[in-house]
Image (cartoon, grey):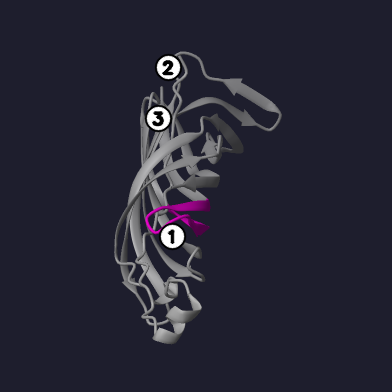
Amino acid sequence: MKTFLMILALVPAMAFAAPTKKETPAKKATGESKTLKPVAKANLKGLSIFASFDMTDSMNFDRSSQNQSQSGTFGADKALGFGAEYLAKTLDNGIGLQAGGTFEMGRTISNEKVGNTTGNYTGAKPEVQLWTVYGQAAALLTPEIGFFGGLNYTIPQVKNIPGGTWKGKVGYQVGATYMYSETLAFDGIYRTLNFNGSVDNQGVSTSYGNISVQGFAFRG
């Protein structure tokens, strides 16, 4: 039975305080409403947790075996993920520095396509889980809208591929945040998660120079 696998990307649901301006008697007379102070000056330090859904259903790869090189695509499930993020520092210019991590649940690889040829996996299909850590800068332009971008490092866990050894690589991510409320945000992210590895099967060695999960993810 096909396992529905899920990743995380994760970026943060950023919560921030909503202080009110002191009202003068004149302001009270005109009925001026309470407003959020500029987000760039708000104290955003703290821990956020989030859930994510990765829309990417494929993984690009480059590999070589017996002096032959190939590029292709693995067909894979979309993925759910979970993560946490910490706003470590806010600079005087309003830029926030964030660090976080995500775990994306296993996604099953159902087939691989090289050129015009597609081969389906049978039996126990390969499954990939991804742990990702990242650091990024975030700029909140209004009390509701912000942007962020930075680098990530992905640590893969691959099942059902005998003789495989896998290592993490650096990728990147950029995105935007919409503050729905003072404690809930929705993020749209475009990211690349990279890793590599090698497989030694019955004396035949195959080297994967890069495997890339590239596409859009959403978080809340």
Asked whether, in this view, residue 218 is left or right of residue 96, the answer is right
Observer-side mark, 2 or 1, equals: 1
Cα separation, mark 2 vs mark 1, equals: 33 Å
Asked whether, in this view, residue 96 is left or right of residue 122, the answer is left
Disc 2 secondary structure class:
loop
Residue 179 in the magenta stretch? The answer is yes
Disc 3 secondary structure class:
strand
Instruction: Tell me what residue is drawn at x 41 percent, y 33 percent.
Output: 128
Q: Position of residue 108 (x, y in %)?
A: 46, 26
9 to 46, vertically: above or below: above
Q: Position of residue 172 (x, y in %)?
A: 48, 57
Identify the residue at the far front of this view: 29
Q: Which mark is residue 124?
A: 2
Choose between 185 and 1: the one closer to the eye.
185
Instruction: Tell me what residue is drawn at x 37 percent, y 25 percent.
Output: 162
Give the quadrant of residue 24: bottom left
Instruction: Tell me what residue is drawn at x 67 percent, y 25 percent.
Output: 117
Q: Which residues are magenta?
A: 170-190
Q: Which mark is residue 200?
A: 3
Disc 1 secondary structure class:
strand
Q: Which residue is mark 1?
A: 151
Give the crowd class for mark 3: few <14, some 14-19, many >=20 residues within 10 Å.
Answer: some
Residue type at tag 1? Leu
Cα separation, mark 3 vs mark 1, equals: 31 Å
